[in-house]
DNA sequence: CGCGTGATTGCAATCGTTTGCAATTTTATT
DNA sequence: AATAAAATTGCAAACGATTGCAATCACGCG
């Protein structure tokens, strides 16, 4: 009873913060209030109505921290974006960010909240254990394997509710959702060759396994068809990418007539550079991208590209995760890429 | 003591889940363990080392829910994206999503986690109170006022730790960070007129107050200069926007020679339509956008646009929020827009 | 050798909700 | 009307970490 002198101010009437406060007003026990507000249990209709009325009147909401602690579940799914090599790369990368948008939609729809965490693995060895063990999240979605394949594998054995966006490898232990990158690479190379290219270049970093798979697919086809192909490492960070591409184009001038860009972002920049150099696309040089971002249909000329179905990917990630939360040990989901024929190849 | 028959299996050795478990192993009390792990308090160096060693060995991490409950703070900042009119609009809108990326960076750097919530105000009247009162977040950042200006105003009086991305109005009660949209609109109109336009059109929805301000700024300049200007409502949802723009272009053919698009997304689509119709930009028609997204410098021809400094915006949002968390009642922050002269106007 | 001083540690209350179990009240049945 | 069955409610023990306060310990000094 703080300050017993003062008369009943609005303050001393007191804000209703806890079940106990509310229970006192309603003249019932906290247990009853809890049940009434939870909606499900066996509470007398009139009692419930009364409690709900009081709750509404005072704008009362049960403390989530306490609730989550007691129930041992948080209703929160963690979404981690590991930033590997190029530190600033992915979180501003359109593809990842778009996927994130869809994820937010899907998770919200299923009644989960989304906790976003960007991690820099180099600075923080056990980011994944930390995230999982934090007790803050019921499950984890990792967007992109980056260079963390091993770490993810390690964790996967002991922790069921985790799904990863990325590439599927033979014999992999963690559950992954992703496009068949190798097949995508094949489609790209096939198309370039079919439209007349005789010497190919892959524009992109081949470190990340997703990109490696794209390159591998393209190379397989090129080799089979007796067409040359070379990889030209290109970073994704928006500042560097322009120059790098310019240098590469300089270097390959006349020696290459088909470019397979690891992502649409790279392809779009490439298209712009080519335009500035006065190179005719697809006349002198054919270009094909990967992702099918919204921009890609808006370029001049519209970009031919390999489409990843981002919405389906997000849905897959969430579905699998929910099944894993329910205890099922799900298989990975590999989505088929689709060639979007437009005008650059 | 469940199952007293079985000998010491790895299981019965037991995973260390709680302070108490760890305390038992270390032979100290939970209080000491807590202090040792928290790092700050007065614990004997040797004791601390021992406890840390055991913790590391068993991969122990304190339960966050319990910690947060006890300390009455969560270390989480809520980020809400209200989806007004066009339901699917904003979360996939490049601008918002880019801002979100920067926010994630800023918050992580300051040691906060980010809880993302997409809300559909029409379906959920008190989304904001719910988010705030949930006890899940220490503070809230709202991305975009959408059509929720009033609701936000209502809440602002009673809840300090909230900052909103959006437009600043005279006499507004909630703390906002945003570009000076009206000034941006002026810059756009001035530029269009300076480069010879005699009749303008604004391509965008004028409902959301951000856009309304952009239009108002442009109109002010147009009126002063005796130039006609009309608003052509255009939605942002990627599916609809193409057709709508096509219709508008049809309608204004020959009657308008300067287009101010509410966002770069619209401008880019517009550019593409114009290209398809064989309209010369900027010869016959000048176009100017708003945002300066990464794509905008890659279009053909590169888009002249009004730049919003997204990174500065994110930094501003987080700085102000942290100050509000510390109890300060901060002023709004209005960022200056900048005209990016490229080739479409 | 006794006592003061500071450094460590343990104790136990607390954060606010949920939920199994038991107690109580209603309603139904014979 | 008595008793059984069902429907509500209250009680109190969790959930797991933090922290004020008191207890203990080690050490040094007179």
Image (spheres, coloured by chain):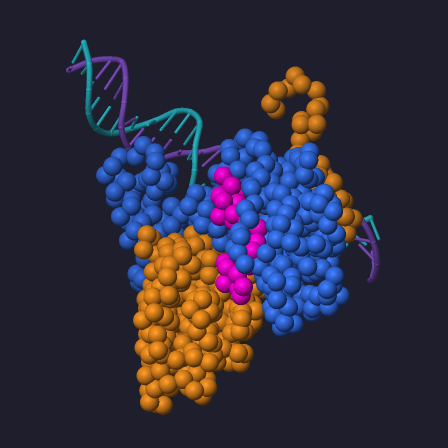
Chain colours: A blue, B orange, C cyan, D purple
Tally of marks: 0
**Viewer-proximal residue, A144 or B331?**
A144
Q: Which residues are magenta?
A: A294-319
The picture places residue B19, in percent across and down from the top left corner, at 63, 41
Q: Is residue A322 above or below residue A62?
A: above
Answer whether residue B235 is visible to the viewer in this image: no
Q: Quadrant of residue B54?
A: top right
**Viewer-proximal residue, B34 or A309?**
A309
The picture places residue D7, in percent across and down from the top left corner, at 27, 28
Q: Residue furthest bottom?
A: B225
Identity of the residue drawn at 28% across and 49% down: A54
Identity of the residue drawn at 48% across and 51% down: A102
Answer whether residue A178 is visible to the viewer in this image: yes
Identity of the residue drawn at 43% across and 43% down: A110
Residue A306 in the magenta stretch? The answer is: yes
Q: Is residue D6 above or below residue A322?
A: above
Identity of the residue drawn at 74% across and 61% down: A255
Q: Is residue B75 left or right of residue B151?
A: right
**Viewer-proximal residue, B195 or A58?**
B195
The C terminus of chain A: image quadrant: bottom right
Q: Is residue A27 above or below residue B273?
A: above
């Amino acid at each position: 009873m703080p300050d017993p002198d003062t008369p009943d101010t609005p303050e001393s009437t007191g804000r209703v913060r806890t079940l106990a406060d509310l229970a006192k007003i309603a003249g019932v026990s906290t247990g009853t209030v809890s049940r009434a507000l939870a909606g499900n249990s066996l509470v007398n209709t009139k009692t419930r109505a009364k409690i709900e009325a009081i709750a509404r009147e005072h704008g009362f909401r049960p403390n989530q921290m306490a609730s989550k602690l007691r129930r041992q579940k948080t209703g929160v799914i963690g979404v981690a974006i590991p930033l590997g090599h190029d530190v600033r790369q992915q979180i501003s990368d359109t593809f990842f960010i778009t996927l994130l948008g869809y994820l937010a939609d899907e998770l919200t729809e299923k009644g989960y909240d989304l906790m976003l965490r960007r991690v820099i693995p180099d600075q923080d060895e056990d980011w994944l254990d930390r995230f999982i063990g934090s007790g803050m999240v019921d499950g984890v979605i990792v967007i992109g394997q980056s260079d963390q394949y091993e770490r993810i594998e390690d964790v996967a054995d002991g922790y069921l509710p985790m799904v990863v966006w990325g590439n599927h490898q033979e014999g992999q232990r963690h559950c992954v959702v992703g496009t068949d990158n190798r097949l995508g690479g094949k489609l790209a190379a096939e198309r370039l060759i079919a439209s007349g290219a005789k010497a190919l270049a892959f524009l992109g970093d081949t470190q990340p396994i997703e990109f490696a798979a794209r390159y591998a697919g393209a190379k397989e086809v090129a080799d089979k068809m007796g067409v040359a192909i070379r990889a030209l490492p290109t970073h994704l960070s928006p500042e560097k990418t322009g120059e790098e591409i310019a240098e590469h184009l300089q270097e390959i001038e006349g020696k290459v007539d088909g470019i397979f860009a690891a992502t649409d972002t790279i392809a779009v920049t490439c298209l712009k550079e080519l335009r500035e150099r006065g190179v005719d696309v697809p006349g002198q040089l054919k270009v094909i991208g990967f992702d099918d971002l919204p921009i890609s249909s808006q370029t001049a000329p519209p970009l031919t590209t390999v489409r990843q179905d981002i919405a389906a990917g997000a849905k897959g990630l969430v579905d699998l995760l929910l099944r894993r939360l329910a205890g099922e040990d799900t298989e990975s989901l590999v989505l088929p890429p689709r060639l979007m024929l437009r005008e650059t190849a």
